[in-house]
Structure formats: structure tokens, C-alpha cells
Amino acid sequence: MNADERIPVRMTVDRGKFRIDLDPYQSWIEGTISESGRRMKGKWIRPRGNRPTVRMPFRASVSRLSRFRSVGQSNEYDPKVDGRWSVQFSDDQDPSVATFKTVDGQIHGTFLTTLGDYRFLEGEFDGKQLSLSCFDGAHAFLFQAELQEDGSLKGLFASRDSYEDQWTARRDANAKVPDPFQLTTVDPGAKWGELSFPDLKGKTHRLDDPAFAGKARILTLFGSWCPNCTDHARYMHQLQETYGERGLSILGLAFEYDDEPAEQIARIQNWQTRLGVDHPVLLGGPADKVRAHKAFPILSAVRAYPTTIFIDGDGRIDSIHTGFSGPATGPAHTRLCDEFERRIEALLGADSQSPK
């Protein structure tokens, strides 16, 4: 449970031991349950191919549903943190945006960046200290900050147990991230269609293979390990159902943690099955962005997963969108979906009938 997000999981229990499988990311929590049945401990384990496996200690106890505040402390929450904030992370040259709101005494919110969003965050603000977190099977995020005398926020961002960054924020009702349609460019002379990649059965295809043709095309660069890509894939599935009969074709190019194609294929197939995604997918290679750019060199850089490339029926690249503002971003997600659909409608053209 993360703010408005609910993630179903599969749990098995046997003689005081338990395992919680966290699909579609092929990670799990395993451990033991106390004799009283009121405490659990163990580890969250997430294999990441050729990267170090995540092994993060986990513990839980039966209590009221509150992430940070101890039982018996005040339930009064100061709403002064509510609103829109301009954010700067120390490790990011680009500005970000945070949105917070109080819901039943809890703070719900997220951070929008040029690479995507930081999911459904939930936590508390006591008038001085802000604490927010989320866990979705792929990421474990913690944001903490203190309100400064000038009304700004200053704090720490931690991802899993291996990454930390400093961040600051100030109120700004007009705060926005750079236009994601302007962040990634394409070489004007690039012949994207001549690039070739294997499918999940090992057959190599050029990107302009007639099997992928359409009156409008979307090519997505993604990874099955990426929650923003999961949000994006669900939306791509909706677009395919809405516009497929009118000529929209969607193709995924997967960049995975593993170097071995067999492992990449297994991860992607599991991801497709769990999400019900049925558009074709080709193997782009390892997820490392430098190596991904070498495999897909027509772009100025592979900045984010997902990256969405809109292509017209004649094979010309119309536009490129970097990152994805998922459902956690609320109005920003709605505006982005509207813009995607506007561009698809324009590419399909007036001669294509609207869906009934």
C-alpha cells in the first residue's frame, strides 16, 4: 500500500516461514513469522542480472497503519507542506517538481523529474520534519527533509541501501520540469529503420520491418525492471486497443540488466505475462545507458527509460518524449496522456475514422 496505490502480491506460508513474490519485477521478500504471529523478519531480495543483487533487511509488526509516527504520539498534522514545490537534487542538473497533499492525516505526493516520477509516496509532516516513502517490489524510496526558517525544505533521498542524494525545495505554484519533448533529439540523417534487433525467438528484424508498419507508429525504449516502464506499458496497451484498428503500431525495444539474451528473454516474457502486454518486443541489449546509446545511436542520448518515439506512416520521426509521468502524478499524467493521444490523432490523419 503506497498512498492510493494497491499492489497485489502472492504470499506463501509454511511452518513459520513465508515468501512474498513481487511481480512483475521477479523480486521477493522471505523470512520468518514469530510464534505470536505478530512479527515478521527477513530480507527483500531482488536479482539484477549482472548488477549486484539487492538484499535488504525487512521487519514488520502488527500495528496501526502508519509508516513513521509511533503509537501514542499526536495525530495532528500540519498541512503547511501541501502544494507544489520546485526541487533541486544535488546529483541532477535539471530541476524537478514535488507535489504534496494531506489525506486523512497522511501526506501523499510524488516528485516529477526529467526521467519520470518517484511513484506513489506516503508519509507524514509534523510541522518541521517531512518523511515519505514507497516500496513497490522494484524500488524502496525514502525522502526526508526539514522545514527551514525561510520556508524551504532541505533533506535526503535514499534509494534501497546503496544510494543517497541531497535535495532542496521551495514553494512555487508554477514549478515545472523541462519540456520532455525537447530533451532528446535525433540525428537528421539517421536511418532508424535500418537498425536491427532480435525478437524473443532469436529472429533478427529491422525496425522498418513491414510487420511493424502502420499509419502511425510508436517505438518505446524500456526495461522490464522499471516501474515507470510498467506504467507506460499499461498505457501503451490501452492505446493499442483504442487506435490499433485505425493503424497504430507499437513496438518495444527492451534494455535489460542481464547481458545474456536467454535471461533477458525470460524476464521480458514474465513481464509481458504479468501485465498482459501483447505488442511485439525486440531485444535492445543491456540497460546501461552508454551501451544502449551505442545500440541505438540515432538519438542524442538514451536519457531515460521509457523513451517514446512517435513515427509517421512514411517512417519519419515526428517527436521524442523522454521519461513518463505515471498515475502517481495525477493531473500531469492526465495532461501527458491527452498530449500523446493528440499526437497519435495527428499522425493517423483525418482520413482515419475515430473509434466508436
Image (cartoon, rainbow, N blue to C red):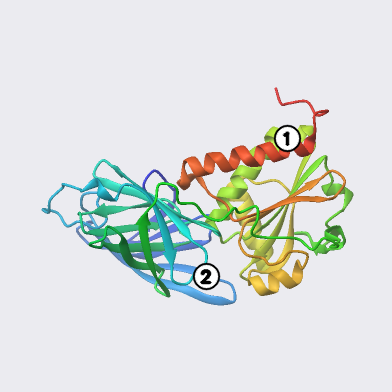
Q: 129 above or below 278?
A: below
Q: Please identify the residue farthest to the front as the structure is shown.
A: 150
Q: CB under 8 Å between callouts 1 and 2?
A: no
Judged left or right of residue 302, residue 146 is left
75 or 336, which lies in front?
A: 336
Q: What quarter of the picture does the C terminus occupy?
A: top right
Residue 294 placement (x, y as % from top left) = 74, 73
Q: Disc 1 to disc 2, how far (Cα)?
A: 40 Å
Characterize the local packing of mark 1: few (<14), some (14-19) or many (20 or more) Cα atoms within 10 angstroms.
some
235 or 110, which lies in front?
A: 110
Q: How many marks?
A: 2
Judged left or right of residue 91, residue 350 is right
Residue 47 has which mark?
Answer: 2
Look at discs 1 and 2 and give the one toward the viewer.
1
Characterize the local packing of mark 2: few (<14), some (14-19) or many (20 or more) Cα atoms within 10 angstroms.
some
Secondary structure of the residue carrying numbered label 2 = strand
Residue at horizontal 75 percent and vertical 36 percent from the top: 346
Residue 228 placement (x, y as % from top left) = 54, 54
Residue 153 placement (x, y as % from top left) = 31, 61
Residue 150 has which mark?
Answer: none
Judged left or right of residue 70, residue 18 is right
Secondary structure of the residue carrying numbered label 1 = helix
Residue 46 placement (x, y as % from top left) = 48, 67
Q: Which of marks 1 and 2 is nearer the N terminus?
A: 2
**Amino acid bearing label 1:** Glu
For mark 1, what is the residue? 345
